Amino acid sequence: MRSLRKPREGQKTALERSRGKEAFAFFMAMRTGKTLTALQDFVRLHEAGKVSDLLVVAPGGVYETWEDAISLEIGDPPEVHVWRSGAGEVKKRKLQAFLKSRKPRAFLINVEALSVVSTGARDAALRFLGSGSVYMVIDESTTCKNAKAKRTKFVVRMGELATYRRILSGLPSPRSPLDLYSQFLFLDWRIIGARSWFSFRNRYAVLRERFIAGRRFKEVVGYQNVEELQRRIAPHSFRLRLEDCYDLPPSTYAMRRVDMTPEQKRHYASMRDFATTQLASSDHVTATIVITQILKLHQLLCGHATDEEGKVHEIPENRTSELLEVLDLCEGKAIVWCSYDHDVRKVVKAISFGTSGKGPKPDEEGLSQNTVLRGHGRDAVALFYGGNRKEREEEERRFKTDPACRFMVATPAAGGKGRTWDVADLVVYYSSTNDLEHRAQSEERPRNVGKVKPIHYVDLVVPGTVDEKIIQALRAKIDLAAVVTGDAWREWLI
């Protein structure tokens, strides 16, 4: 087993920094070669006789890409098995044979499978860890940042059985410094000096006692001792950004104004002022928590609302027509990011068939009919979201290779990580999730080494609403949940 490619300068530095360390963090942006760096690190340790096998835990949209990377980057590669839930008897027998094999092995498993005990993924991972000396990697390690999640607790347990541990992430603390706790607990709790979540939180967060509805709890209102935390993790991590490696073309950012329809104005004012609104069907939409209220306001601006029974109601909107006008100006390929699966389906239909101009009422998908815009045809659109797991790899292939497929419509939750969509020069945020990590990761998809055209980012925004405040916060790299505390929520709703 040997590495087939020589590391570049940044990767060399990462490998030197990690040498001799059982636990290390590669905080490297997408396309700086963090997968290659981890594989070369594994090969180096394998050749030294310190590890026999490789275990990769990664999000569902990412983990399968490691199979190609292993075959391309490692000469005489290890035997690879890709975990797939719900496998038939033949695949189960192949898994059993793989787990009993004494050849060098690489086991690739999606982190979501570890959330459920009944899938068998946990048992398979533990058997793999117990049958050899394992180099374990968590790719996009922020998927395990929730210290209270059962999945995170299990991954930490897996780390205790691994000989060498690595985490990979381009944005290690997207929401707060507290995001680092579980990631470094997996590596080695001694790095951060805390085995307990509460002691870690008390050391690095500013807490305030609150009492609501008969319940007393501590709320994070700020952070402290951050420089100390940075000093602790510095010897055990390496940070590399894409702009540190290459001269990237400058990106441009713009906002495209969208006006509310009369129906949206009425529902928005009611939800903003009273945290509830009555739809034409007499069903109610309510929000009792500020964050929930903000997100429901955001959904209204996107043209839909979910009532208390879980039913989605369409509301006339101008956002989709504005998107089509932006795309009509696009000469090449574009990515359209949507916050919700519902938006994906609506946008794909609109791009494919356009708007019909048959009157002011919305059609069954809630599209405004005030503007006539031509469709580009269904073959021009690829989609990548939670509703097309089985087809989305083929959809991605069409977008990357077929000149006729010009638009990728996706959710950041599904396509925001581990994908290279550098064929696009235009990125439109039809709607923006309040998740800072989703924003940062999704902006990376069209960037790549050798890119010569600048990337143009466009946000569709309704001025003077939470829509505008969310986008401003994301662009300033501020997390919504972190700032809507105390009395600050009033600034978002007024």
Image: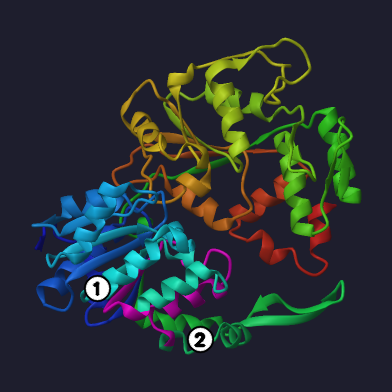
Q: Residues within 10 Å of mark 1 (few under 14, many from 20)?
A: many
Q: Residue at x 57, y 73 (%)?
A: 148
**Drawn side of residue 187 relative to residue 472, left or right:** left
Which label was assigned to residue 16? none
Residue 74 lies, in percent from the top left, at: 14, 57
Q: Is residue 41 visible in the rendered structure shown here?
A: no
In the image, residue 159 sits, relative to residue 373, either above or below, namely below
SS at circle 2? helix
In the image, residue 119 sits, relative to residue 137, either above or below, namely above
SS at circle 1? strand
In the image, residue 29 sits, relative to residue 212, either above or below, namely above
**Drawn side of residue 325 relative to residue 11, left or right:** right
Residue 171 lies, in percent from the top left, at: 46, 62
The residue that label 2 is drawn on is 228
Q: According to the image, what is the colour scheme of the structure?
A: rainbow
Disc 1 from disc 2: Cα separation: 31 Å
Disc number lying in front (1 or 2): 1
Question: Callout 1, which amino acid?
Answer: Val
Sequence-first tag of 1 and 2: 1
Q: Which residues are magenta?
A: 160-189
Q: Residue at x 71, y 51 (%)?
A: 469
Q: Quadrant of the N terminus?
A: bottom left
Q: Is residue 44 visible in the rendered structure shown here?
A: yes
Dividing the picture into quadrants, the one containing residue 30 is bottom left
Question: Callout 2, which amino acid?
Answer: Glu
Residue 381 lies, in percent from the top left, at: 46, 25
Q: Residue at x 42, y 45 (%)?
A: 445
The residue that label 1 is drawn on is 134
Residue closer to the observer: 226 or 410: 410
Residue closer to the observer: 207 or 231: 207
